[in-house]
Amino acid sequence: MRHTKVKDLLNSTTTLQEVNAKGWVRTFRNNQFIALNDGSTINNIQCVVDFENTPDEILKRITTGAAVSVTGNLVESKGAGQKYEIKVAKLEILGDSDPEKFPMQPKKHSLEFLRENAHLRVRTNSFGAIMRIRSVLSFAVHNYFQQKGFVYVNTPIITGADAEGAGEMFQVTSLPLDNLPKTEEGTIDYKKDFFGKHTNLTVSGQLEGETFAMALGQIYTFGPTFRAENSNTSRHLAEFWMIEPEVAFNDLDANMDLAEDFIQYVIKYALDNCGDDLKFLEGRLLEEEKSKPQAERSEMTLLEKLNFVLENNFKRVSYTEAIDILRESTPNKKKKFSYIINEWGADLQSEHERYLVEKHFKCPVILFDYPANIKAFYMRLNEDGKTVRAMDILFPGIGEIVGGSQREERFDVLVEKMKALGIDEKELSWYLDTRRFGSAVHSGFGLGFERLVLFVTGMTNIRDVIPFPRTPGSAEF
């Protein structure tokens, strides 16, 4: 008999039918009630075992984590909180789970403990919910761009280009590390490497994406990116997923419009399609906040926060205006910020971004026109000669969620900026071709997918919204 997903059984409109369900035991009470979950929903289905007619050796094997198959009639439940249950006629143990050894017992586990067991943590309610929401958000990303006629482009994972110019890249090599070939000058001879040159894992697909946008009009990438940044924080990963649209003929204003519309679409999609999971995570968050001092608790529940982003236009503020606000702010004057804002040109930190969003404007904020010397070489220089057409979108709880810009379309200006930063013109000759042949205004942005999932799920550590987090000193699984 073919098995039916728990989600479909709970949404059924007919009872007294024989059904088969397969899944994993969450709990087994009174030698009678199995809470069965198969990952299709946050909700379990109760399976009622006729324990008087079930051998003891079978009952002993119904333990948390065991995989079982149950067959019986779907009937209306007499218990509170559930519409249907299965009256079990046949039970089969598909896979045993030793209760003395299985780590995911039905009790509260710390998030740190669960990270150490990332291969099993998805069996918990919280991580099942997070990963289902992640999946739905991923679909929503593609849905949005496909509906708007964007072309999905797979940019290279192995590349010789450093899009950010930061140099924090993972090197790719097939050379023997214990016997590296050297040039006459004593440096590593990369001509003998697999690709015949120095290569790395990508930090961004943007540069390659621009070349496709200048032929296909509007494109997006959605793939893994890598940063060898030795940063052990709750907001950074060494491997994460990036969404990067690039649009020919879009200026910065159109870029901001696109980013705002996109974010609101995917959040609404999650609200419309992940109701049970979001409601569970909202309850989890409320419970977690009870242990915090009142001043540190969120002003809004998770669902209120998500709806807040949908219902409020993003406030657009120039970097210069933001600096003035921060300089005059109470935490800056009282030296409560870890990084005090004294002058124009400071690189804003997460604490500054969150102050603007959560305390001053109390809505999502788009900052634009940043100082040129704190932004990447490819951003369009403004007429003032000191700012660039850059934009960052700031969200409550996490700070920056999107970074983007109008790209520098003028060949001469771009070459001068590259020279000033010591970027090899020959290495990026292919990129400069988009400015040599049919250059035009174009813009794009990058959104770290995990930061989006972090915001939508209400989690506070980015390591908890990706299946297997990669961080400094940790590459388990």
Image (tube, rainbow, N blue to C red):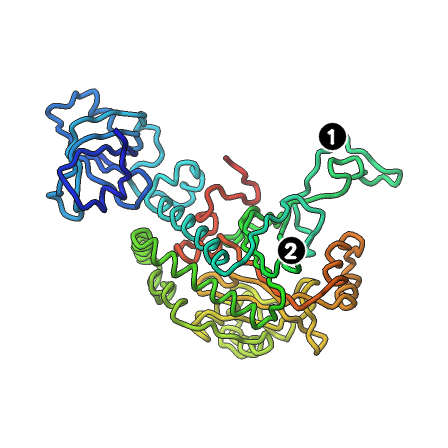
Q: Which residue is mark 1?
A: 178
- Mark toward the viewer: 2 or 1: 2
Task: Classify residue 19 by image quadrant.
Answer: top left
Q: Does the image show residue 424?
A: yes
Q: Looking at the picture, which amino acid does disc 1 mark? A: Asp
Question: Tag 1, which secondary structure?
Answer: loop
Q: Quadrant of the N terminus?
A: top left
Q: Is 353 rendered above or below residue 458? A: below
Number of numbered discs on residues? 2
The residue located at (52%, 66%) in the rendering is: 258
Residue 133, image x, y percentages: 39, 50
Vertical order, 223 against 458 (above or below): above
Pick the front one: 108 or 430: 430
Q: Nearer the viewer, residue 201 or 300?
A: 201
Q: Is residue 291 visible?
A: no
137 left or right, relative to 448: left
Residue linked to disc 2: 212
Crowd around label 1: few <14 · some 14–19 · many ≥20 (10 Å): few
Q: Position of residue 234 (x, y in %)?
A: 49, 53
Between the C-alphas of marks 2 and 1, the distance is 40 Å
Q: Which mark is residue 325?
A: none
Q: Answer above or below: position of 79 versus 367.
A: above
What is the x, y in percent for residue 251? Answer: 61, 71
Q: Label 2 crowding class (10 Å Cα cut-off): few <14, some 14-19, many 20+?
A: many
Depicted 423 relative to depicted 356: above or below: above
Residue found 26% across the figure and 40% down from its top = 6
